[in-house]
Image (cartoon, rainbow, N blue to C red):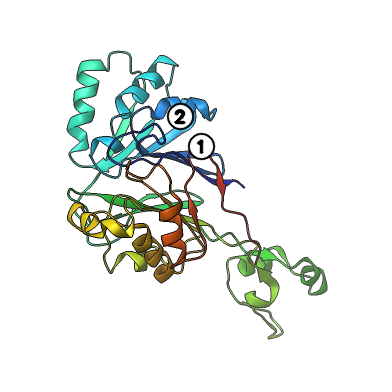
Amino acid sequence: MEFTYTPLGTASATPSVYRYPSAHVLNIRGRLFLIDCGEACQIRLRRMGISFLKIDHILISHLHGDHLFGLFGLLSSMAMVGRTSLLNLYGPERLRKTLDFFLEEYGEGVKFQIEFHPLGAMQGPQTILSARNLDIQAFPLRHRIPTYGFLFREHEPELNLRKDLVEKYQLGISEMARLKRGDRVIREDGQCLEPEQFTYRPWEPRSFAYCSDTSVFAELPKWIQGVDLLYHEATFADSEVECARTTFHSTARQAAICARTAGVKRLLIGHFSARYPDLSKLLSEARSEFEAVDIATELTTFEVPLKKY
């Protein structure tokens, strides 16, 4: 059951010879989610061998160009390669105007439906998609314009029965069904069968959070508490902390403090200013606060492993 994250671009503001603008792919059990769509996103998708036709959900964090300018090209290419299936697009309400302009001026060949899901004002996390095995929440970040982070979390798996006890206690079909639902079973002879004794969770649900662009604020660690993998912007080094404050961005150290406070398992930092061709300083400053941190190296796939209880 795959759960992987692949950064396609981790630059901030403008592309550089070192990094592409923001775009990221999350693969959860074969379902592909594209988070942000910076310039040349479709080229990076081709480089990774990721089919345009398999992306059914695109989430746009905010309407700054470095997170959006690749969308027209990707939608056009989806049409040219014959996409017919529904595409779900999530983003700030003002993205609707951008989408309408695209469809009016360049949408003649678009034969597939684009369903837009606007993200409005919110004070905390809100569920924007609840599927059979997965929930996605959006939450407000602190930036110069309305901006959203995203939290992906698998559902708790169904309980499994302990096969040795099924035979030992000669469990019936209805008894097994009730125990798997987590219900207590009272037999006719008064015997009480507790679900905790007869069942177990086969594996732990996995989670991923995306936070870009944002300055630090107190509520964020609570909203992403305990996630397995966190991508957090780290636009600046400590020496530019005032610039980070005035532009509503974060330093690498601040990203690491957020991760530590939230108790996340692993942190990947990205959205780097072009002034840092060498990222070792940013990584060092982050690791001084939180050990389990790495660079979100572009075109590298990071796995969230399946863990059994």
**Residue 116, label in figure:** none
Q: Which residue is nearer to you in this view: 185 or 266?
A: 266
- Residue displayed at 33% across by 41% down: 274
Numbered disc 1: secondary structure? loop
Q: Which residue is nearer to you in this view: 91 or 281?
A: 281
Q: Earlier in the sequence, mark 1 or mark 2?
A: 2
Q: Is residue 85 visible?
A: no
Numbered disc 2: secondary structure? helix
Instruction: Please name the residue that numbered disc 2 is placed on.
Output: 44
Instruction: Please name the residue that numbered disc 1 is placed on.
Output: 299
Task: Check disc 1: other Cα within 10 Å, few if <14, some if 14-19, many if 20+.
Answer: some
Relative vertical location of residue 7 with respect to residue 239 in this rendering, above or below? above
Relative vertical location of residue 70 with respect to residue 133 in this rendering, above or below? above
Residue at the extreme bottom:
190
Relative vertical location of residue 204 with respect to residue 22 in this rendering, above or below? below
Q: Which residue is nearer to you in this view: 3 or 85?
A: 3
The reply to whether the C-beta atoms of the residues labelled 1 and 2 are less than 8 Å apart is yes
- Residue displayed at 24% across by 55% down: 244
Query: In the picture provided, is 163 more to the left or to the right than 274?
Result: right
Query: In the picture provided, is 133 more to the left or to the right than 147?
Result: right
Looking at the picture, how far across and down is residue 102, in whole percent? 23, 23
The amino acid on which the numbered mark 1 sits, given as a three-letter code, is Leu
Looking at the picture, how far across and down is residue 12, in whole percent? 31, 42
Q: Quadrant of the C terminus?
A: bottom right
Query: In the picture provided, is 120 more to the left or to the right than 59?
Result: left
Q: Is residue 5 visible?
A: yes
